[in-house]
Amino acid sequence: MRFTLDDKDLFTTRRAPFSADVRLGELPRSQMLRAIAYDADGDQIASDSYLINGSPHRFDVRIIDPIPGNRHNDSIRMRAQVTVPEGRSLEELQVFRNDDQVATLYEAPFTVPIELPDGPALTIVRIVGKLADAEGPAAFVEDTAIINGPATLEEVQVDFVELYTTVDDRDRRPLLDLEESAFQVLEDGVAQEIVRFERVDDTPLIGTILLDVSASMEERLQQSVQAAADFFQQVITERDELSIVTFNDRPHLAAPFTRDRIDFAKGLMGLRAERGTALYDSLIFTLYHLNGLPGQRTVLLLSDGVDEHSRYDLDDALEYARRSEAAIYAIGLALPRKSKESPKKVLEQLATETGGRAFFVDDASQLGAVYDQIAVELRSKYFLAYQSSSTQPSDAFRRVEVLVDARGARTRTIRGYYP
């Protein structure tokens, strides 16, 4: 029995108990744990996997059987695993043999026999899941298994790096009329081929307002709550979803993702300013909450103070933010002028690393104007996607830079990603 974590070997044993202790690190990252069984000849006979710290919003389908590498002559028994986001349902799971649809499944167990009319010839089995009450690319997921493939055949998973990019002029006004030819993407200094390009004005926005409700916010809390409610009212459409996380010395999910104004408003009711500030812990909690959601993911962070109670530090928060690929828009409200750790610098760094932007205001009455600016920017982005040309096996952080051939233009996007 062999155990792997994110395809890296952990432990191998030839005798029971078939178990292993796994160190997952300090941060709650999603990681794939896999167990693989072999017979006496070294041939794989069974396997299973489990996504640790998987997002409750994840939609996924996966072929469990047949096992890759085994030979089949007349038929196979296809078994699939389906993961559906909390509160959602599967509409259907289509099963294909090569180009022919051979079955449609609607509920577990997702198992079906498939005849192999060409006997031991290479056959491709594909499953496509559709989420009920959903449209667009996010409504579909698929998986593929190669049956009776040659021993030398390698399956390669192609993942695209996706960049939501803001382009401003010298006065920080969005530039909205640029063509694809004006853009260049560099990964670790090497030019990449852009395979998808479009203006983002109706891509679903998936966001969280991360609202400081520590004791120091008491005099400004009412105006801060009203500004958040106005943002929802003016910006969120039937395709968007927004949640609320409040925090003092611990985070609290005040309202789950919703596009309903009443449900959102309930999360803002009865808030009290009390206790200290755990900014870094709360940000990591929020980014984990966003994990697995499709679309343009955004955190609108409002705070008026210095972190005092977090278990994690700024480096941990930055590391987690880089892995999340969500843009952080940080708003510093009446920040202290003197403190051991500069809150302004912290908020700027969080925003810069993730392709967001930092704002600083002295009075809560200015929050409405700030939210208006953020709303304009979120609807004024470019979407670029590329397949990395890097052949390095390293899982180290890869730096990304987007350049634009336009006078005075400035770009903002994520600083990089982990493969």
Image (tube, helix red, strand yellow):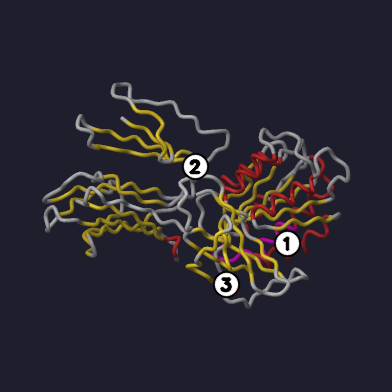
The answer to whether residue 42 is left or right of residue 390 is left
Q: Is residue 101 magenta?
A: no
Q: Secondary structure at mark 2?
A: loop
Secondary structure mostly seen in the magenta stretch: helix
Callout 1 environment at 10 Å: few (<14), some (14 to 19), or many (20+)? many
The answer to whether residue 96 is left or right of residue 371 is left
Residue wearing tag 3: 199
Return the residue nearer the eye: 384 or 77.
384
Q: Amino acid at mark 1?
A: Tyr
Q: Residue at x 70, y 66 (%)?
A: 410
Tell me if residue 241 can be seen. Answer: no
Residue wearing tag 2: 30
Mark found first going from the N terminus, 1 or 2: 2
Given contact means CB atoms under 8 Å apart, are the residues at marks 3 and 1 in contact? no
First to last magenta residue range? 227-240
Q: Residue at x 69, y 71 (%)?
A: 174
